[in-house]
Image (cartoon, rainbow, N blue to C red):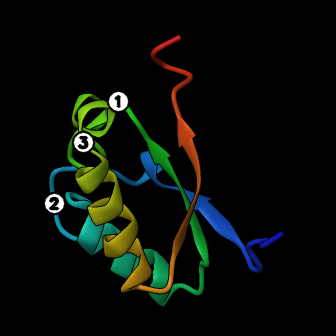
Amino acid sequence: MKTIKGPAIFLAQFAGDSAPFNSLDSIAGWAAGLGYKGVQIPSWDARLFDLQRAAESKTYCEEVKGTLAKHGLEITELSTHLQG
């Protein structure tokens, strides 16, 4: 069993229209630069994660994982609490 080591951060509180908070790649670089090892991704903000696309495409899901991996990050959770 593999476990994530190190702190994680919830990205929703930082997501916005200005860099580095407006795309998954740039916010991942920002979070990694602060020493985080994992991210909780809000699934209602398509700037960071497109839930509909993820439901339809395994390739898209692998791309998301790859985007985070290049910054040394892993997904800890997909936050769906606003969708119910």
Question: Mark 2 highlights which residue?
Answer: 18
Which of the 4 image quadrants contains residue 69? bottom left
Does residue 16 sit above or below 46 in this rendering?
A: below
Q: In this view, does 63 lie to the left or right of 30?
A: left
Kind of residue indicated by mark 3:
Ser
Kind of residue indicated by mark 2:
Ser
Name the residue: 21% across, 47% down: 47
Crowd class of label 1 (few under 14; some 14 to 19; many from 20; radius 10 Å): some
Question: Mark 3 highlights which residue?
Answer: 57
Task: Give the quadrant of the N terminus.
Answer: bottom right
Q: For marks 2 and 1, give the CA distance.
A: 18 Å
Image coordinates for residue 39, horizontal then vertical, percent: 54, 61
Q: For marks 3 and 2, give the CA distance.
A: 27 Å
Question: Mark 1 highlights which residue?
Answer: 44
Kind of residue indicated by mark 1:
Trp
Q: Element under label 2? A: loop
Q: In this view, does 52 lie to the left or right of 40?
A: left
Crowd class of label 3 (few under 14; some 14 to 19; many from 20; radius 10 Å): few
Image coordinates for residue 59, horizontal then vertical, percent: 24, 55
> Does label 1 or label 3 sit earlier along the sequence?
1
Q: Is disc 1 in contact with disc 3, using a CB cutoff of under 8 Å?
A: no
Image coordinates for residue 52, horizontal then vertical, percent: 25, 28
Looking at this view, name the residue that lies furthest to the right: 1
Q: Element under label 1? A: loop
